[in-house]
Image: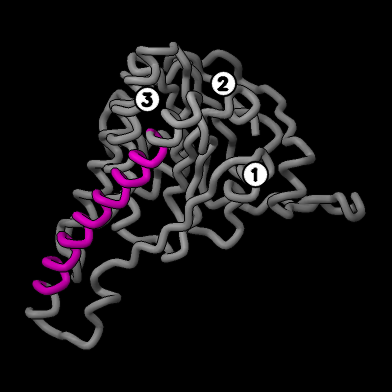
Amino acid sequence: EEALETTKNVVWLPLTAGEFEAAPKVFELFGGKVIPLNLPDAYSLNEGKNGRFRREANIEEQEKLHTEDRELAQKIVLELEASWEMKGRVVGLPLTFKIESGDTIRLYSFYDHFLKAFRDLWKRRYEKTGEWAVVVADNFSALRLSEDDPILGSIPEATGRNLGILLAWMVSNGRNVGILTRILTHSKDDLDYITTGLFRQFGLVLQFEHNEYSWVKVFQNGEVYADRVEVTLPKSILSLVGRREPGQGEDEWIQEVSSARS
């Protein structure tokens, strides 16, 4: 909500599929656009094949599907650009995606191509108007994938890493093209997995301690700025995500217990 109140020019990339993913609901509340994504991986399309042939067939099919992902991503961005030219202003933002196919490798392939195309589009927009956009990636930790997958080989690791490297570039250089990049993740280790030193590239970091969601530790330019700052989640968000706190009646909320730092 804070990002949407800053600007309507927001693109939110949910990197994991969840039944209780709140982004689509919040974006609809703000009049944003939600695009459904159904991007199953090759193994779900090649069921019934076995052994060596199955692995090779899956890898070959997955590579073809990644080409389709690129075409879909570029099509969406081209449609955005056409609508901006027709209306004479930015429309179709804020934008997020509703993942219908679960956590798949193709999702990261799609995001990689979409983000590159959107970055180039917004660069042209920024040079003309000086308008800013915000890109949010939630949850960066999901990009740590197997480099020796029994079905898809090295494709998962390479695809996740490519998207991670692109997001790292956005953190360091996005301002040059008018894009502010925000990353949600579980721990600093997730950032180091993609590239060491990425943590220090963030101008501001808010670290929620394990199972503690009312206080954050604040880092500025990689250094501790404040050890303990109280934060309050707005009621509008709490009601949307359905979290309830004991003893507060119908408006109460419960914060789901996390297994790691955020």
Between 57 and 38, the one lying in front of the other is 38
| Count of numbered labels shown in the rendering | 3
Return the x and y of residue 63 as percentages of the image width and height.
15, 60
Residue at the extreme front: 86
Q: Mark 1 points at which residue?
A: 26
- Residue 40 in the magenta stretch? The answer is no
In space, the residues marked 3 and 2 are separated at their CA atoms by 30 Å
Lower sequence index among marks 1 and 2: 1
Q: Is mark 3 on a helix, strand or loop?
A: helix
Mark 1 or 2, closer to the camera: 1
Q: Is residue 255 shown above or below 93? A: below
**Residue under the image location 53 percent in, 59 percent down:** 18
Lower sequence index among marks 3 and 1: 1
Q: Is residue 155 shown above or below 119? A: below
Between 199 and 54, the one lying in front of the other is 54
Q: Residues within 10 Å of mark 2 (few under 14, many from 20)?
A: some
Q: Is residue 98 shown above or below 43? A: above
Q: Mark 3 points at which residue?
A: 122
Q: What residue type is labelled 1?
A: Val
Residue 163 is drawn in which quadrant? top left
In space, the residues marked 3 and 1 are separated at their CA atoms by 23 Å
In space, the residues marked 1 and 2 are separated at their CA atoms by 25 Å
Q: Residues within 10 Å of mark 3 (few under 14, many from 20)?
A: many
**Residue under the image location 35 percent in, 33 percent down:** 118
Q: Which amino acid does label 2 sit on?
A: Val
In screen coordinates, is 179 left or right of 148? right
**Residue under the image location 33 percent in, 33 percent down:** 167
Q: What residue type is labelled 3?
A: Trp
Q: Does residue 138 appear anywhere in the picture? A: yes
| Extent of the magenta region | 56-81
User: What secondary structure prevails in the magenta region?
Assistant: helix
Q: Which mark is residue 218?
A: 2
